Each structure stands twice: as C-alpha cells, then as structure tokens.
C-alpha cells in the first residue's frame, strides 16, 4: 500500500521511494534569501566601522562587540552582531560601478552592464536551475524585485514573482484569492477550457498554459496561500522581526522558504543616505533602547530574527542568507551630513547554506576607502553564492540571438567563505 | 569540384599563402588563430586575455596580435631556430599545459602554416605584400580579393558561423528546409551568405494587394510555401484596430463594418487614438520617458520623421537631459535611429561590422561640446573627446553647432529610413525583417532585403510613419490567417497583447476605463493571476447575452458550435462566461 503521491513518483519517474526522499532532501539544500539593501548601505556605518579615523570619516557611531575576537560592528546592530559566529562577513568587495542601476546590474548578475544585453540576475538563474515551482512559485520578490533582479535575456518564465505588497502595511498579495467560491472557480475553469478549445486562431501557446496551471495551483492550494498569510504568525514572533518593512518581509521570506519556495528576495528601501545619514540610520535610538525609526534597528531585528528562526527550525544549513546592496558609501561625510555613492569598498554578509561560521574575509584600509586585503569583485561574491547553492557557474546559456553566454565568465569562488 | 576550384584560384595572381616565402601574418597566420577560436571573447580575445596572453578580439588588430606573439615574453612565444618548440605551438597542441585544452593538432594545416611562417622568419608582411580589399561569400565558398587584383580561395581559412545550426552548417551544408545566413569572417572583414532550401516544389502565389506582396510572394513561391488564406472580416477588424489604435473595436463598429479593408485602415490610422498609440510606441524608441517628452513626441507624430529627428538632435532638450554623456548619445544615434549597435566599439572594434573605435568616438565627438546646466542645454565654445590620448574631431561637417551636421547625415542616410521601416514592420508583423530590430548589419541580413529597401524607399517619400504603417496593413501578407508565424510570412504571427493594450482591451470589454496596472505588463504569472482574480475586474463582469459577450471580448459573433455549447442561463452563468472569455488565449492575443 502506498500513497498516491508515492505511487506517482515511483511510476512516472521510475524512482524508488528512497530516491524521492533523497531528492527532497537535496532540494532542501538549496534555498536562498537575499536581503537587498536598495540604495547602497554605508559599509562604514554597518559592518566596517573606523573608530580610529578622523571625525569626518568615522562619524558618531560607536563600535559594538561581536562574538568574534577583535571584530566589531555598529553598536546599533547588537543582535545581528551577536550572530556573527554564524556568518561570514566579507569586508573587501570592490567595484567600479557607482550608478544605482549599473551597480545593481553588476552585483545581481555578476556582469558589468552593457547596452547590448541584460544579463539574468542570480535570482533568475536560480529559477532556471531549480525549475518552476508547482503550487508556490519558486522565486519570489518581496514586495517587488530590485532593478536588474529579473530574468534578463532568459524567458519571462524565470522572472521572480513579485508579491507587490508591503508585508508591514495591510499586507495582501494581489489577486491570490479567487473572487468566487471553489465550486464556481471549477466551473469557470472548465468554461475557460471550452472557450480555448473553440479558439482556432491561437492553437499552441505553452507559456500561457504554464502560467495558467501555476495560477490555478496557487489559487487552489491552501498551503501555498497560507504561506503568504502573515497573520498566522503569533504576535510575539511578528514583534521579534520588528514592525518594519524589512522585518515583516524577512518573516514572510522565512514562511515562504518553509513552505517550499527556493529563492526569496527581500527588497528593502531607504539606504541611499545622501543626507542626515546618522538620523536615517539610527532613528531615535537612545540609551540602548529601540525605536523603530532607524534603518539599523530595523535591519538588526529583521535579519537576526530571520537567522535565529531558520536555525531553530533546522533550516539554516539549507538556506543561504545574503545581506548586501549595490555599493558602499563615501568615507568622507558630505556637507549635508550624508555619504554619497562609493563602489570601491562595500561589505557583504553571508549566513547559513554552507557558509563558514565566524569568518571575516578581507579588510579595507584605515579610511574605509579601498580594500587593503583580499579584494573581491561582485563576480567573486556570486561565484561563492552559486557554489553554496549548488549551481554550476560555468554553465552556458544562449541569448535570444543564439549567442552562448556563461552564467559567470569572470571571478572565482571565495573559498574561505565556504565551510 | 571544390578541389578544382581551389586549384584554379591558386593558379592566378600573386596571392599570399602559396609558398613559405609568401606567407604573411595577417593573411595566413592570423586567420588560423581566429578559426581555431584562440582570439574568441572567451579565450585570449577577452578584454584581459588569458594568463597574460591577450589577442585582439577575433583578430581585428593584426599589428597588436603580431606584437603580442613575437615581442612579448621577450619573444619566448616564438622560436625561430626551432619553430616546433615555440610556445605558440606547444601550448595549443598541449605539449605544455594549456587552459584552453588541445586547440590545435600537430598534423593540422594551421600547425604547418605556422611552422612555415616561423621558418620564414616570422615576418609581419610577406616578400610580396598585398592588402585585403574585400571578401566575397558564396554558399560553401569564401574568396578574398586583394588590392592588386589577385584573388584567393580562403574557404578553409575563414571563420564561418551559422545563424541557425538547425538549418545549415557553417560550411553551407543545408540540413533542413528553410533559410538562414552564415556569417563569414576573414582578415578583419565580415560578410554574410544566405543558405537554405525549399520546403517543396515551386508554387504559384497570387495573393497580391500591394508592392509588399511582390517580395513576400516571390520568396514563398521559391520556397514552395503556400500561404494561409486571408482572414475573415471580423478578425481583420480586430487585428487592424488593435494595431492602429491599441484597443478593441466596439460591438457597433464590428456590426457596421462593410468589409472595405483599405478604407478601414485609413480611417483607423487617421484617428487621434492612433497618433496617441503610435507616438507612445515611438516615445520608447526615442527614450522619451518624461510626460513632457512624450507630449513632444505626440505633437511631432503627424510631422515628417526626418524633421522630427533633426529637431530632436538640435533644439529639443529632453534627449540631452535624459542622456548626458557624448558616448551614450552616440550609442543612441546608432541603436535607436540607425539600427546599429555601436556600443561594442567603445572598447574594441565591432566584432561583426566594419565599425571601429575611431568611428565610435567620431560620432560621439559631435556631442563633445553639449552641456546641460540648470536644466538647459548649452554649447561650450571648445572641448574635444580624446581616445588613447589623441583628440578626436568629427569626421565631417563645419557647422558651428556640430549637431546640425550629424542630424543631416543621420536623417539622409539609408540606414535611417531602413531602421524606421524595420521597426514599423516589426510592430505590425510581430517580428522585424531584421532581428533584433536595432541590429542591422551586413552580417545579420534581412529575411527579405529587397522588401526592406522598398519599404525604406517608400518611407523616404514623405517620412510618414502613419503612411508606412498603412502600406503594410493594406498588404495581403498582413491580412492572412494567423499561425505561429514563420520567417516567410506564410501565416500571420499572433502575439500576446502588450500591457497597455491589454488594459485598453479589458476596459473596452467591460465598458469601464481601468487604470494601467503594471502587474499586467509582460507575460507573467502576476498578469495571469490578475486577469483571473482581480476583484476590480470581477466587479465589472456584468451579465450579457452570449452574442454580446463574444462581440465585446473576442470581437466576433459566436460560431454555431459555440452558440450550441453555451446553453446555460442565469446571471451567474453569463458572468462566468464573461470571465472565461477575458481569460482566454483568444482574448489575450492579437491574432
């Protein structure tokens, strides 16, 4: 006696139950949550403080302790800093691209932008390599995908599915629920099939059939829709992530990964801090107490809760968490108390998913201007990410015009970042 | 046969490559390296080379490559005393470790030529130097023509790539019915040759409505393809309305249509909605994203296109506010106005075209003195671009505002009219005569080169996009029944509705203007979900008769079969039918 599911797996694919289980386990090994700090987070005010630099560089923030000897991060990141023993922190990322769009393209695709071709982001490469999800889309963006986090020259089927709603405010994924009851939806579906059957002008349209099947899968699967329902989390948990967009998005990301999604991008805004950077980052943080106004407390709660939850649920080893933005910010403060774009140095934080625990890679010079040790480029970061996700970065795709292009054509894995 | 031709060619003139004394680097050695892939973008031709050995991409710079091979590493790459010991040979034959694997066999022609060349002292030029004038590509054969009048069969030296391996191999062997082109590269030059074979014996194709069909029919006939019959009036009305004004016909328009298709096309193209829709399409091409810029393109739509572009380049500020850099402006001129992708040439000579870095900077130099200050475009009295430390001046013209010279040159060039004609064709027919639509070049020929020329010729008469669209829409090729679409236009190619058009179509069907929602841009899961589940759309699904619902959504009356099928009654049933029609593939496409 076997369940219907096992029977299907066994007979259709010729797999044994053990194979099927092993396959299920292997797939668990490759999930990813990208926390994208849109606008470019200041490396000097997050993970790479320079307390000994002149005041116009170091700013007012104080370094806070971490479990790693001699490694300090902003004191406004106490919880996340406290988890550095689960993370690899890369402090020596460098790139020449200082424009938001161009830099995003480089960080997300591993290719410097060219007008001739938009490359697929690693989110969409993951979608292609992982396959299209059944009930739940495999690659999801919360609330929307960052610029250049899309499918590029690959087909539209690998675009991330954007939830198009902010999880921290009246969150509701648009059009996820049918406006009619189940039996009526069934009738609609069969009527639609009849309309399509009568259609003579458009005979074969597989992309649309795929989307339709996915849409019905999502709409009719209680489990899939439940994954998007944040109200199923208790208040205490929701509170731990913080009420911010970043916090509730990270919570949603965890729910989606738990429910079987393979790649979730949390796209957080507000990091393009050209003025009043300290107020924007710290908010009303006074005497060690949180107020949720600042980007740092938001990030601290969101990502620390995410890593802790993943670990508590046994998902951290199979889920790679990446925290990064498109570039760092100028070491010298500008006239209006902000920092401008600075791609020559930035930090990337990795956790889980086969990443080494308690590792710091590279360092910047005393003013945080350039890498002083172990400079790495966006393509090296992505090589490392692909390796952690089990994706072969040497694989060759073809563009619409048939040109062969490798997933990455430069760079190499940052070996010390992987366990 | 091939051998005889080769002998014949070798028998005449003083072409290089006949004997070791005559071997030279650009004409004999470099082509082998190109053919073997040594200087491909993924190997030593990449911007950074491989392991310190960098060659120019696909051999565009023979002097550079010569220096890299003979001078660098203190000449260790070549060993004139013992040619076989040269790194240049020991690496690719894998006698030494080589990242690119075994790229050359020791008993190959390439190996022999290089050994001979080294024995002759590794000269750059042979004792009887000749310059390559041009290459001529024919199916299965490539001939080099030299400046001294000599010719040579370089078929085996040329690098050939097929645009579609399924139809023809690079050597010109046709494997399946159909047509593709083979790009041929030799000595820094590029040519293309068409390869293909008919699907069946020649057929007569007489479905002609205007000059467009002369070219389309000729090819269908030669390839033995019988086109699908013309579509019915309802289908034509829906198709033409979607293409001309970006929305569906109303039920009244459908019922009133008398079948005069040419008059319909003219009437549609003269409507204000047509100018709105087409100027919107053109605003994307001209990078007019701001509302004021879009409005400018809209007001210019009824004016001649060449005049519009002259004003855009000289006078209208939005372009310069949107694109600040002379090099990016040059790329805009190439890609958007002339259908030429020049961006490759910023860093290296164009790999598929005769367009050099110098040409690229030459075009950019027309914009060298443009400055934007406080939202205004001004000209500086001086200032030049530089390339490798040298000032680059515009290649022609003497106007005080250089942009006037450029604007004149652009709008009078053949490429300008051709590029616009190709875009109009692509918008209406679902695919350009050249694809991608902004990549017109010798090595990427049109499927119907004479048709493209004819359309460009027609366009040059009045530079009216509206009239050119009318010409295409009045052809028999436009009016056929649809199918998957093919490069020969035997069937009309159906296409998914664009996001804005889909919004308009749903609005017209539900009789309620909906705001454009970006979730329905593009073919995505979000679009499918939106049409299926959106409560806003669902609320607009008012029950109506089966006949009316078909007219409102699919722009046709239901067939007898359909009438017989939809026998249910009640508001809920009719509403669900409305829903099914809106979600159908027939509704979501222009077919």
Image (cartoon, coloured by chain):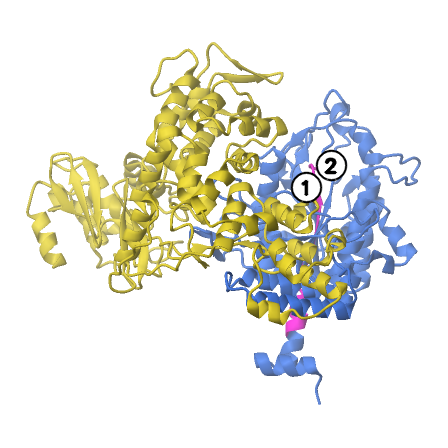
| Span highlighted in magenta in the image | A23-42
**As displayed, is residue B45 above or below residue B382?**
below
**As displayed, is residue B465 above or below residue B448?**
above
Residue B192 showing in the rendered view: yes
Which numbered circle lies on residue A263? none
Snapshot quadrant of residue B449 = top left
Badge 2: residue crowd in 10 Å (few <14, some 14–19, many ≥20): many
Residue receiving disc 2: A271
Mark 1 in CB contact with mark 2 (< 8 angstroms):
yes
Which sits earlier in the primary sequence, circle 1 or circle 2? Answer: 2
The residue under the point 33% across, 48% down is B213
Q: Is residue A232 magenta?
A: no
Q: For chain B, give the colour.
A: yellow
Q: Position of residue A287 (x, y in %)?
A: 93, 36
Q: Are the numbered discs 1 and 2 placed on the same chain, yes or no?
A: yes
In the image, taking residue B171 as reference, residue A282 lies left or right, namely right
- What is the quadrant of the N terminus of chain B in the image? bottom left
Snapshot quadrant of residue A289 = top right
**As displayed, is residue A138 above or below residue A370?**
below
Between B143 and B224, the residue placed more toward the observer is B224
Instruction: Tell me the chain of label 2.
Output: A
Q: Position of residue A258 (x, y in %)?
A: 76, 63
Q: Position of residue B534 (x, y in %)?
A: 73, 54
Residue B95 showing in the rendered view: no
Between A419 and A199, the residue placed more toward the observer is A199
Instruction: Tell me the chain of label 1.
Output: A
Q: Dot 1 lies on which element? A: loop
Q: Dot 2 lies on which element? A: loop
The residue under the point 33% across, 58% down is B102
Q: Which chain is blue?
A: A
Residue receiving disc 1: A325
């Amino acid at each position: 006696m076997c369940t219907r599911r096992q029977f299907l797996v066994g007979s259709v694919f010729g797999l044994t139950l053990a194979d099927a289980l092993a396959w299920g386990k292997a797939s668990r090994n490759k999930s990813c949550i990208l926390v994208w700090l849109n606008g470019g987070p200041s490396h000097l005010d997050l993970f790479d403080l320079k307390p000994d630099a002149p005041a116009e560089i170091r700013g007012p923030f104080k370094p806070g302790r971490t479990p790693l000897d001699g490694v300090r991060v902003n004191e406004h990141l106490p919880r996340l800093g406290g988890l550095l023993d689960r993370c690899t922190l890369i402090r020596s990322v460098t790139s020449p691209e200082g424009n938001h769009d161009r830099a995003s393209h480089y960080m997300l695709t591993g290719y410097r932008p060219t007008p001739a071709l938009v490359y697929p982001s690693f989110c969409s490469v993951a979608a292609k390599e992982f396959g299209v999800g059944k009930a739940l889309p495999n690659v999801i963006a919360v609330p929307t995908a960052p610029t250049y986090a899309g499918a590029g020259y690959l087909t539209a089927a690998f675009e991330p599915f954007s939830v198009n709603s902010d999880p921290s405010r009246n969150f509701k994924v648009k059009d996820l629920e049918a406006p009619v009851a189940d039996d009526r939806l069934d009738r609609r579906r069969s009527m639609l099939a009849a309309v399509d059957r009568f259609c003579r002008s458009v005979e074969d349209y597989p992309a649309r059939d795929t989307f339709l099947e996915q849409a019905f899968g999502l709409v009719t699967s209680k489990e899939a829709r439940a994954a998007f329902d944040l109200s199923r989390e208790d208040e205490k948990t929701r509170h731990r992530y913080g009420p911010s967009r970043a916090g509730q998005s990270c919570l949603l990301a965890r729910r989606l990964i738990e429910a079987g999604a393979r790649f979730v991008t949390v796209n957080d805004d507000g990091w393009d801090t050209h003025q009043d950077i300290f107020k924007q980052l710290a908010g009303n943080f006074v005497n060690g107490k949180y107020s949720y106004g600042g980007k740092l407390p938001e990030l601290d709660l969101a990502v620390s809760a995410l890593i802790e939850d993943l670990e508590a649920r046994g998902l951290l080893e199979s889920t790679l968490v990446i925290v990064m933005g498109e570039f760092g910010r100028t070491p010298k403060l500008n006239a209006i108390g902000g920092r401008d774009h600075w791609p020559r140095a930035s930090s990337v934080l990795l956790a889980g998913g086969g990443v080494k625990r308690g590792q710091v890679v590279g360092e910047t010079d005393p003013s945080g201007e350039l890498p002083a040790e172990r400079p790495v480029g966006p393509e090296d970061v992505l090589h490392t990410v692909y390796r952690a996700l089990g994706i072969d970065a040497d694989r060759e795709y073809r563009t619409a015009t048939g040109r062969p292009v490798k997933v990455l054509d430069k760079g190499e894995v940052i070996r010390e970042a992987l366990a | 046969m091939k051998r005889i031709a080769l002998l014949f060619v070798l028998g005449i003139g003083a072409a290089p490559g006949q004997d070791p004394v005559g071997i030279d680097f650009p004409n004999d050695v470099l082509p082998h390296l190109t053919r073997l892939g040594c200087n491909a973008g993924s190997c030593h031709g990449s911007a950074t080379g491989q392991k310190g050995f960098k060659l120019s991409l696909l051999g565009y710079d023979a002097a550079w490559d010569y220096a890299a091979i003979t001078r660098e590493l203190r000449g260790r790459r070549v060993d004139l005393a013992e040619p076989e010991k040269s790194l240049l040979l020991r690496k690719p034959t894998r006698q030494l470790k080589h990242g690119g694997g075994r790229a050359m066999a020791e008993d190959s022609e390439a190996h022999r030529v290089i050994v001979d060349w080294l024995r002759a002292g590794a000269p750059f030029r042979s004792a009887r130097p000749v310059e390559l004038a041009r290459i001529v590509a024919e199916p299965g054969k490539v001939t080099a023509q030299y400046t001294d009048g000599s010719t040579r069969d370089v078929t085996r030296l040329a690098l050939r790539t097929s645009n579609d391996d399924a139809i023809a191999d690079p050597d010109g062997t046709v494997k399946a019915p159909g047509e593709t082109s083979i790009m041929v590269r030799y000595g820094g030059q590029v040519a293309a040759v068409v390869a293909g074979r008919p699907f069946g014996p020649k057929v007569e194709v007489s479905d002609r409505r205007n000059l467009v069909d002369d070219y389309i029919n000729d090819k269908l006939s030669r390839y033995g393809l019988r086109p699908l019959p013309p579509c019915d009036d309802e289908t034509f009305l829906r198709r033409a309305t979607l293409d001309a004004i970006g929305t569906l016909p109303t039920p009244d328009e459908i019922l009133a249509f008398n079948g005069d298709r040419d008059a319909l096309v003219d009437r549609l193209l003269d409507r204000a909605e047509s100018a709105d829709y087409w100027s919107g399409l053109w605003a994307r091409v001209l990078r007019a994203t701001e509302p004021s810029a879009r409005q400018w393109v809209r007001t210019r739509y009824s004016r001649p296109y060449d005049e519009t572009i002259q004003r855009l380049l000289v006078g209208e500020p939005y372009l310069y506010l949107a694109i600040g850099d002379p090099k990016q402006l040059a790329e805009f001129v190439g890609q958007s106005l002339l259908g030429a992708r020049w961006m490759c040439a910023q860093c290296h000579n164009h790999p598929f075209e005769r367009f050099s870095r110098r040409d690229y900077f030459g075009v950019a130099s027309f914009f060298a003195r443009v400055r934007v200050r406080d939202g205004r475009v001004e000209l500086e009295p001086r200032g030049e671009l530089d390339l490798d430390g040298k000032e680059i001046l515009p290649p022609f013209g003497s106007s005080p505002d250089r942009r006037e010279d450029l604007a004149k040159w652009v709008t009078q060039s053949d490429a300008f009219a051709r590029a616009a004609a190709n875009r109009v064709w692509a918008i209406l027919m679902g695919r350009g005569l050249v694809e991608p639509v902004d990549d017109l070049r010798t090595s990427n020929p049109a499927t119907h080169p004479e048709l493209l020329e004819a359309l460009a010729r027609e366009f040059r008469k009045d530079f009216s996009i509206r009239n050119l669209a009318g010409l295409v829409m009045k052809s028999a090729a436009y009016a056929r029944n649809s199918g998957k679409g093919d490069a020969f236009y035997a069937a009309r190619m159906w296409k998914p509705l664009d996001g804005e058009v889909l919004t308009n179509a749903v609005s017209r069907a539900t009789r309620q203007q909906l705001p454009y929602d970006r979730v329905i841009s593009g073919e995505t899961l979000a679009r499918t979900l939106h049409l299926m589940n959106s409560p806003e759309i669902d609320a607009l699904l008012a029950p109506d008769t089966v006949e009316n619902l078909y007219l409102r959504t699919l722009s046709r009356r239901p067939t007898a079969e359909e009438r017989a099928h939809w026998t249910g009654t009640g508001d809920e049933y009719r509403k669900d039918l409305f829903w099914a029609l809106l979600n159908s593939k027939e509704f979501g496409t222009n077919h």
